[in-house]
Amino acid sequence: MGTVAENIEIIRARIRAALERAGREPGSVRLVAVSKRQPLEAIREAMAAGQVLFGENYLQEAHDKVLAIDQGVAWHCIGHLQSNKARIAAEIFDCIETLDRLKLGKALESRLAELGKTMPVLIQVNVGGEAQKAGVAPHEAAQFCRDLQQFPHLIVQGLMTMPPFVDDPEESRGCFRQLRLLGEELAAQGLLGRQGPVELSMGMSGDFEVAIEEGATLVRVGTALFGER
Ligand SMILES: *Cc1c(COP(=O)(O)O)cnc(C)c1O
């Protein structure tokens, strides 16, 4: 594996190529550098290479990093978030990609209202229907969006998914496509994307190109960028 800077260049080139194959606009995908369990040094290397968006899974770790880095970058929460941690999450993150329960939405809303801050959020959808994975079922997503409309500080911007683990990324294509179709359906009902385009967060180190071909606007890449954790 190369340096973080070299890896980022390679990933950017692969993103561009996937966009071109899919006939999509250059620049229509944002790279979320997944920095969980990586040291600050690695984050600073990525920043030096122009990376401005990071994804973190664990609240305490994210809190420490946000305080240490403090400026110039945006942080997405991509891990399971407990409602009792929502207050801090509302303070430190720029987007919660893993909203999957009304209780969590309510806890975020309460702190955001105090802060006078709105927050883009994505709804985590369990497209594969796996019992061990978080996320709302696809058929529950529309009602969940409607329920979230009572929370004016949450801007429901799109959907996020983690497909079942497979060896061949082609096997995830169906899940990615399903998320895009669900996103289109919800957007047509006016339930997504009140500010700007609908976001679809899907694709990780092993399958981000397939996800881009299927419409991802955010890809969450850790290992291919920073190396093993
Ligand atoms: C860890 C993680 C990633 C990054 O996975 P890699 O395979 O290391 O790229 C992406 N999304 C979520 C939700 C994660 O927890």
Image: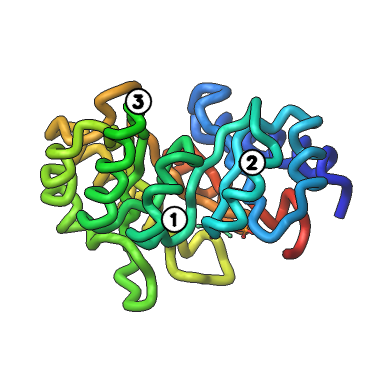
Which of the four quarters of the rendered structure image does ligand 1 lie in?
A: bottom right
Indicate the quadrant containing the C terminus: top left, top right, bottom left or bottom right: bottom right
The answer to whether residue 158 of the structure is visible from this angle is yes
Residue 173: give its label. Answer: 1
Give the residue at the far right of this rendering: 2
Q: What residue type is labelled 3?
A: Pro
**Quadrant in which residue 184 is drawn:** top left
Mark 3 or mark 1: whose residue is earlier in sequence: 1
Q: What secondary structure is found at the residue carrying circle 2?
A: helix
> Tag 1, which secondary structure?
helix
Q: Mark 2, mark 1: which one is toward the viewer?
A: 2
Name the residue at 37% across, 52% down: 86
Q: Nearer the viewer, residue 114 or 100?
A: 114
Residue 148, image x, y percentages: 18, 43
Give the distance between the C-alpha atoms of the residues marked 3 and 1, in whole angstroms.
22 Å
Label whose residue precedes the other's in the sequence (2 or 1): 2
How far apart in space, not on screen, are marks 3 and 2 (Cα)? 30 Å
Judge whether 157 appears above or below 88 on screen: above
Q: Residue at x 54, y 44 (%)?
A: 219
**Location of mark 2 (residue):** 67
Q: Say few, some or many: other residues with alpha carbon within 10 Å of mark 3 (under 14 / 14 to 19 / 20 or more).
A: few
* Relative image position of residue 171 (x, y in whole percent): 47, 64
Name the amino acid type tagged 1: Arg
> Relative to the observer, which residue lies in front, 31 or 34?
34
Tell me the tag on residue 197.
Answer: 3
What's under tag 2, amino acid-wise?
A: Leu
